Amino acid sequence: MTETAERHASWLELFFDLVVVVAVAQLAHRLLHPTWADVALFVMLYYAIWSIWTSFTIYANVRADKTRTRAMLIGMFGIAVMAAAAPDVAHAVPGGGNHDDWFAAAYVVCRVSGSRSIQSSGAIVTSWPAAQLGAGLAPWIVSFWVAAPATYWLWALGILLDLIFTFHQARHPERLMEGLRAQAERLRQRGRRQENTGRRRPPRETPAFYEAVLHPAHLGERLGLFVIIVLGEAVMQIVVEASGQDWGTPLKLAAAASFALVVCLWWMTLQYGVTAVPEAGERGLPPWVALPAHYVMTAGLVAAAAGLGAAVAAPAEHLHPGIRWVLCAGLAVYFAASTVIGVATGARRLWIWAWAVPATAVPVLLGLLGGPLPAWAVVAVLLVAALWRVAYRPPATAPAAA
């Protein structure tokens, strides 16, 4: 292996991840008393925080040892503000009002800061343009002058524009580079004309644009570390909710099944990468596919973590329908996204139809029919589905010819 291939996350990046731990915990708590509106807000708030983390992760990936500590700390502080504001979005706080504007302001500042940090070097991340080009920021800015619930519709519009722009531009990187170079040339010519007429000082020389190439090993490690952070939230929920209770048989069963479920999810990430697809790690996917899959799968894990905490809190009782669906749907979303990636990357049909699809169907059926079961039994059935995924063994490949 080369020195480049052995590159790992820096201490600065690991320190940056600390604030994500808190943000994930804050968002998971929003799902403890879920309504459809709460779930929709969770999806948007989680995307906002995830996109900031992604932008600065890509910045560190591109700049490597030239990553600026100040830029990373600005992003870290912005995520901290978003995490502090997240529980009070759409909820009144003492003294009146809410923290919607604080959340949106921190999001806008972080997106602008991350974009400028990347572009200051001349790098253009064509594989994930959302990291540096604020296509969807305008609706977030307009939301400062709009009252709820229109505020949240504008946030949703901004996220949609962000994704549409990214998918469109990432599939045609040459067009993006040509357009940016043409725009830069027009600005330079305008600056020269103004300089010649004495209307402005000589413009500061800006670096030439170049297409940034993401380091796949480093990006894969960073995405995997994010999964570990989310699984850590599940472990914390289990431990915290088990404290102060009578450790009777229902609690023992719920806690053991919950912990084993987390171990299964960790094992699949360790063995197959963040996509949990055998023989098709995240390196085989372009970032504009791998990153949305990572968002969907980790969002499902955050929801499942909240559900596991509720199950351990009252292991002998029937789960509230909303909590049951948060738990089951979260795991179903995780398995379904992995299955879709498997289909897209040409995974073995045997794995798709005999392992991936059944493991996805079980949480859905449990969400529909699991009302009569106590909480510990719901978790036990989900554990069986996860163990079924873990039980798959890829066939041994024949040794390559010399």
Image (spheres, rainbow, N blue to C red):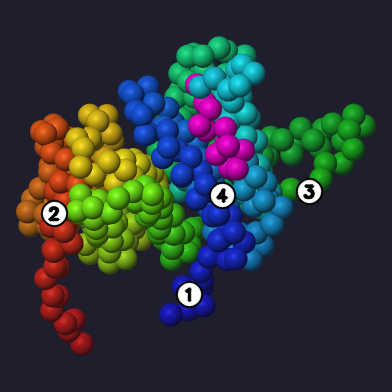
The magenta stretch is: 79-90
The residue nearer to you, when weighing 71 against 127, is 71
**Marks 1 and 3: which is nearer the front?**
1
Residue 121 position in % (x across, y down): 67, 53
Amino acid marked by disc 2 = Val
**Marks 4 and 1: which is nearer the front?**
4
Amino acid marked by disc 3 = Glu
Q: On the image, which quarter does residue 99 sit in?
A: top right
Q: Which residue is mark 1?
A: 6
The residue nearer to you, when weighing 250 against 63, is 250
Q: Label 4 crowding class (10 Å Cα cut-off): few <14, some 14-19, many 20+?
A: some
- Left or right: residue 267 versus residue 107 is left
User: Mark number for residue 205?
Assistant: 3
User: Mark number for residue 19?
Assistant: 4
User: Which badge, 4 or 3, is on the more N-terminal residue?
Assistant: 4
Residue 120 position in % (x across, y down): 69, 49
